[in-house]
Image (cartoon, coloured by chain):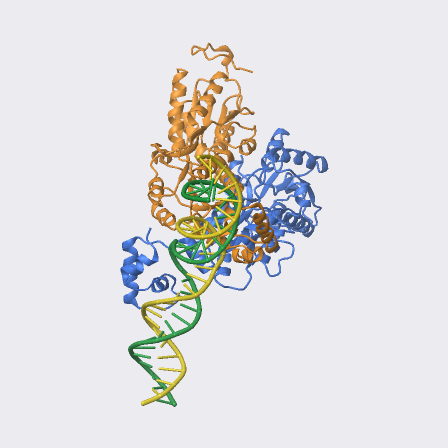
Chain colours: A orange, B blue, C green, D yellow
DNA sequence: ACGGTTAGTCGAAACGTTTCGACAGCCGCC
DNA sequence: GGCGGCTGTCGAAACGTTTCGACTAACCGT
């Protein structure tokens, strides 16, 4: 394995000159540069990452911190990971995947003190998330995918849940639906302060209120069984429901199954919209799900790019919300009897 | 940030003594050890990962190399990743995620020469995979998830496709099915030498032959649309099919959708078995899919553990096949008319 | 003609570990 | 009772970079 010394000797320059050619920290004449580059090429030189990291105090490694609980990742979270990995790689950085949840603050403190990470991207951020303080104390720049409660001075990228819920509700109301049930994550998840669950809940209440409608909300465990149970509960609470808006990628199939079991046809009897969903998942259902398509890998990419900008010295915070895009597929249609009904809220007829 | 020097000074010992306490490379008296540990605790000392890596020529970082193409990862591959990350983390190693496919051999050569990786786990291994040679030349230990064509001297963990296909076919034949269609990955994927596609194809032919049955095989693009097209093709080729065995996690929902569209009830008219599938995905279908449950995160964990054993100096190769476990759910049942039929192959009646 | 920049290069000192060689003391054993 | 072999510790030399200070030569404006 060739070192800088070898390159310097072959090019008949000093080691520092070789370094300057590589880093550009000082001007180097074209002639010298060419000699050095030729020597590098001949020796097939690659800088030693550890030595570089030690001397420069920059590892060129960023961490992707995510809880690694029970069930692994959904399709949406997986897209964050691949987007982040691709962006880091494209910028010449490395991405280490660390199973560090909001609870593992001690592990994180240890990790951060090792000076292995130039910066970190946090996934699955809770409204109160100890990881933020731990990293800040260790002086590790960070960007969130998601948001804590108080985001002053913090950089984040998140889904614009307010906007997403509003569009979904508008779509359903536009189709004439009035009795709309919102199926969220589990009660425990909501209580734990999981941002998407909390924010969509509030946004749903607000969006329904804007249309003069009463919000009906049911929590669901993240599983097909949870979805079935949720739909059963929903029908008990609102037997006349005509639409379901679901936040829960895992429960949605249980909801569809239970609807089928009970003989409710989709979308004739009940319309279904899935929120924050990847197109692949939406296509799995039959009929394919009308869904709010999540920005997916773009979110991971933007987070990493913002982090790298911080590492290059940019001091400003990057705060950005991306909406999910409504993609109408086969699971939504006009509300049963919508044509016969007057529309006191004034939401116009379905736009085509 | 405290360094070893600070610890040494506080404990009134030499720097090397502190190092020996940490690494255990030489014996240290209990009294000295206690002094040093106390000093470390007081200063909240954490070793600098870069310095350690440089001096020891071991980064404690392992790479997880996977192509990062179009569609991202399926649930099964995601499980590999989380399993690998958890195992690495538990052993005090870090796991870097590198988008390096079988084609990006030059990138990999560069990465390997940087001496950042102590070892690597390869995912999505092709039958001919240039990454193996690149890593071997760079002297980077590796473990495959999957297999190349020639595995002499190579460590790998893979799914036992032969066994898995055999069990799936036995299950269907045991239910009286004779006309069984195998839906594989796309023709291009098979042609590219993607191991799972090739091995299951061969295993299906063999398993069917053992039962005296003719294999019917259809490739499918990895999408719902691909599944629909495949089923259409299958029915054209074998209108009397009673069972579908599908390798393709993405196509399976298209197959189910097309069956529903054509009025074939599952499992009354057609039984469906999904291969190498995670339980969560199997539960998404209605009825829930009878499936060969993939070892999931265990595969990633075992691969990393084998790699770390190599790094600790173990010279033997680790070659292991894990079968998928048959989990009978609602998508399989007796073949239509099976009771009236004699069974010349001697496969007994369905076991209950 | 002269101080003041600037471009270009060099040597050496970090960076924070691990590891090698040396050595002191002690034990047990022919 | 000298000797080989342990145990425990130390000092110093790596490991392969980056970066700082210094130096030379050329060039500028006056």
Query: In screen coordinates, is D6 left or right of B146?
Result: left
Task: Between residue B162 and residue B115, name the one nearer to us.
Answer: B115
Asked whether residue A54 appears in the rendered view, the answer is no
Nearer to us in this view, A132 or A70: A132
Query: Is B221 above or below relative to B147?
Result: above
Expressed as whole percent of the image width and height from the top left, the position of residue A318 reads 42, 32
Q: Nearest the camera: A271 or A206? A: A206
- Number of numbered discs overlaid on the protein picture: 0
Pick the front one: C26 or B250? C26
- The residue sitting at 34% across, 55% down in the picture is B3
The quadrant holding residue A344 is top left
Instruction: Say if B95 sits above or below B264 in the image.
Output: below
Point out residue A78 in the picture as x, y percentages from the top left corner.
50, 39
Image height of B307 relative to A126, above or below? below
Specify whether residue A189 is in view: yes
Q: Position of residue B186 (x, y in %)?
A: 66, 40
Q: Is residue A269 left or right of residue B37?
A: right
Whether residue C13 sits left or right of residue B242 in the image: it is left
On the image, the x and y values in percent for residue A156 come to: 41, 34
């Amino acid at each position: 394995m060739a070192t800088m010394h070898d390159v310097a000797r072959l090019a008949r320059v000093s080691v520092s000159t070789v370094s300057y050619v590589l880093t550009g920290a000082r001007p180097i004449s074209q002639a010298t540069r060419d000699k050095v580059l030729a020597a590098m090429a001949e020796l097939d030189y690659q800088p030693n990452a550890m030595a570089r990291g030690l001397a420069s105090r920059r590892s060129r490694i960023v961490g992707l911190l995510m809880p690694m609980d029970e069930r692994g990742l959904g399709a949406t979270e997986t897209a964050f990971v691949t987007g982040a990995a691709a962006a880091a790689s494209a910028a010449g950085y490395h991405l280490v995947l660390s199973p560090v949840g909001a609870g593992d603050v001690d592990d994180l403190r240890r990790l951060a003190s090792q000076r292995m990470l130039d910066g970190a991207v946090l996934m699955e951020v809770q409204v109160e998330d100890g990881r933020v303080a731990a990293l800040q104390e260790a002086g590790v720049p960070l960007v969130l995918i998601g948001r804590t409660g108080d985001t002053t001075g913090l950089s984040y990228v998140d889904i614009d849940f307010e906007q997403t819920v509003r569009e979904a509700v508008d779509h359903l109301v536009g189709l004439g639906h009035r009795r709309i049930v919102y199926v969220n994550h589990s009660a425990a998840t909501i209580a734990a302060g999981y941002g998407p669950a909390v924010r969509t809940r509030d946004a749903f209440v607000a969006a329904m209120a804007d249309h003069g409608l009463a919000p009906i909300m049911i929590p669901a465990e993240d599983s097909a069984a949870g979805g079935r149970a949720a739909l059963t509960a929903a029908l008990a609470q609102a037997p006349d429901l005509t639409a379901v808006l679901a936040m829960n990628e895992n429960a949605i199939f249980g909801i569809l199954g239970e609807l089928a079991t009970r003989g409710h046809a989709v979308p004739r009897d009940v319309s279904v919209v899935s929120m924050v969903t990847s197109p692949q998942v939406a296509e799995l259902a039959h009929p394919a799900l009308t869904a709010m398509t999540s920005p997916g890998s773009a979110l991971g990419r933007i987070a990493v790019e913002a982090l790298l900008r911080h590492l290059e010295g940019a001091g400003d915070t990057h705060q950005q919300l991306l909406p999910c895009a409504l993609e109408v597929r086969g699971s939504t249609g006009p509300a049963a009897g919508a044509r016969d009904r007057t529309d006191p809220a004034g939401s116009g007829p379905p736009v085509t």
